[in-house]
Image (cartoon, helix red, strand yellow):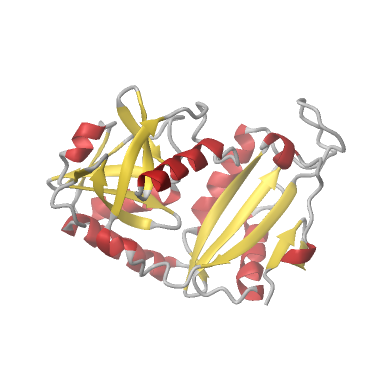
Amino acid sequence: MSRIVHVNGAYLPESEAMVSVFDRGFLMADGVYEVTSVLDGKLIDFTPHCVRLARSLSELDMQNPHDDADWLEIFRQMVARNDLAEGMVYLQVTRGNPGDRDFAYPGPEVSPTVVLFTQSKPGLADSPAAKVGWRVISIPDLRWDRRDIKTVQLLYPSMGKMAAKKAGVDDSWFVQDGVVTEGTSNNAYIVKGNRIITRPLSHDILHGITRVAVLRFAAEAQMEVEERAFSIAEAQNADEAFITSASAFVMPVVEVDGKAVGAGKPGPLVARLREIYLDEMRRAAI
């Protein structure tokens, strides 16, 4: 069965969905996106995704086409119409179609383009990768300086993912000024003893929705949290390491630039944190 996608208020088979060649998302990467996971047919951490979407749009002087209640109805329609039990709902909002190509923004008379689609991922929560962990390499961080805005400008993260694939590993960690910023599509952490160390929020990293929840759950579980930058050498000498994202949840990292982290296998703290996160998210899903 063909997926049902959402384009500007219409629910269509994916083969019938179209966006103008003059859309600024296509021509200028002038848009933002969000990815919300679905477990047991319910949305995970939905409200924080709406908050971040509104912030990203505001930072780019773009109008938000819907309020949170309308977004929730659209997302629920996408889950229901695609019979989505486990997977993700992808949302993209661009500045729209001004009718021609121009570097200058169009006026408010041009409506945003809104696109949503689903991705079915059976076994998302029970990923085999979580049992063996990820291996990562480091590469220079050459992205623009407003990484806190979740834009569709994803070429360099894609290049980082391909560099990892070429090296036979799972992901790349970006490094700037001698310290790790984040992964290609995730926030990065190391563990020393009972202490979780991760970079503080700024324009340098994406303000991860999963990050917020995981750090809250860690504190509630009496784990220490230290928000500071760390180097690749520190990561290689850590007891454990991990990443968080909306689709990977809490994923152990067992090797950095060819050197094993800790015992070279997922450790107990990260395993416990993943268990807590999934339990709490399932309980609070809507």
Q: Most extreme residue toward the top, as rendered?
A: 177
Most foreground residue, 271 or 208: 271
Compared with 259, 12 (above or below) is below
| Residue 2, percent from left and from top | 69, 73
Residue for point 26% across, 64% down = 131
Locate residue 124: give its quadrant. Answer: bottom left
Compared with 265, 174 (above or below) is above
Residue for point 24% across, 42% down = 258
Left or right, 126 with respect to 66, comes to: left
Most foreground residue, 268 or 282: 268
Most foreground residue, 184 or 203: 184
Q: How many marks?
A: 0
| Residue 89, percent from left and from top | 57, 61
Locate residue 151: give its quadrant. Answer: top right
Compared with 5, 255 (above or below) is above
Left or right, 258 with respect to 59, comes to: left
Q: Is residue 55 visible?
A: yes
| Residue 20, percent from left and from top | 81, 47
Compared with 140, 14 (above or below) is below
Quadrant into which the N terminus falls? bottom right
Most foreground residue, 142 or 115: 142
Residue for point 26% across, 42% down = 256
Left or right, 44 with respect to 275, comes to: right
Left or right, 257 with respect to 268, comes to: right
| Residue 85, percent from left and from top | 52, 75
Residue for point 46% across, 29% down = 203
Q: Is residue 207 visible?
A: no
